[in-house]
Amino acid sequence: KLNLDSSKNYLLFFGLIRDYKGLDILLEAMSDERIRQQNIKLLIAGEFYEDEKPYHQIIQEKKIQDLIYLHTHFIPDTEVKYYLSAADFVIQPYRNATQSGVTPLAYHFEKPMLVTNVGGLPDLVPDGRAGLICEPDAASIAAHILKLYELGEDYFLPHLREEKKKYSWNVLVNTIKDLAK
């Protein structure tokens, strides 16, 4: 559906593109030669909320055009599944955040995540279980992307599925019932 080569490895950056979400840091990380050697590509899916020129400039300067797939338009709800399904891992390289709506999406589609150690993100993505936690800089992000692939998606799936249960409707309903008592 997305016309992607199924023989490649795909990371997904999903959602509105805003400065605090750290896409520029992720683009810097993608220029790491080890990532290029691992045949890892970055699928960017979401609208630019701010000026897109600085991102294109990084892509040009780092010569990573062949690693980047830009789907920078509004993604309707009916198409979200295609992006999450195409990805091996979901990357949230935020500079700061209290939380992210991308995290529950990744849980729903059982996609391990790489999140930065900012705000509430690490609380929702247990390190080594539902994904990995790194620092919000290009070197740390690159190293942890490589670690994701070294461990592999199957390593995370049992832990991810267990963690996902915390966010089920049943847990929410039972929590509300307990609060009402």
Image (spheres, helix red, strand yellow):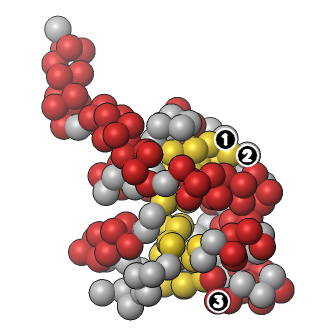
Residue 86 percent coordinates (x, y) = 38, 73
Mark 2 against mark 3, which lies toward the viewer? 3
Quote the CA–CA distance across marks 2 and 3.
Answer: 26 Å
Mark 1 vs 2, N-terminal side? 1
At horizontal 54% and vertical 38% (from top left) the residue drawn is: 128
Asked whether the residues under the numbered discs 1 and 2 touch, taking CB atoms below 8 Å apart as contact, a structural biologist would say yes
Secondary element under disc 1, as helix, strand or loop, is: loop
Of 62 and 40, which appears nearest the observer?
40
Disc 2 marks which residue? Answer: 135
Which quadrant is the C terminus positioned in? top left
Question: Relative to residue 116, is residue 75 depicted above or below?
Answer: below
Mark 2 vs 3, N-terminal side? 3
Asked whether the residues under the numbered discs 2 and 3 touch, taking CB atoms below 8 Å apart as contact, a structural biologist would say no
Q: Is residue 99 visible?
A: no
Left or right of 82? Residue 152 is right
Q: Amino acid at mark 2?
A: Glu
Mark 3 against mark 1, which lies toward the viewer? 3
Residue 109 percent coordinates (x, y) = 31, 57
Residue 165: mark in rendering: none
Left or right of 4? Residue 97 is right
Mark 3 vs 1, N-terminal side? 3
* Crowd around label 2: few <14 · some 14–19 · many ≥20 (10 Å): some
* Crowd around label 3: few <14 · some 14–19 · many ≥20 (10 Å): few
At horizontal 50% and vertical 68% (from top left) the residue drawn is: 12
Q: Is residue 129 visible?
A: yes
Residue 66: mark in rendering: 3
Of 40 and 92, which appears nearest the observer?
40
Quote the CA–CA distance across marks 3 and 1.
Answer: 29 Å
Secondary element under disc 2, as helix, strand or loop, is: loop
Disc 1 marks which residue? Answer: 117
Quote the CA–CA distance across marks 1 and 2.
Answer: 5 Å
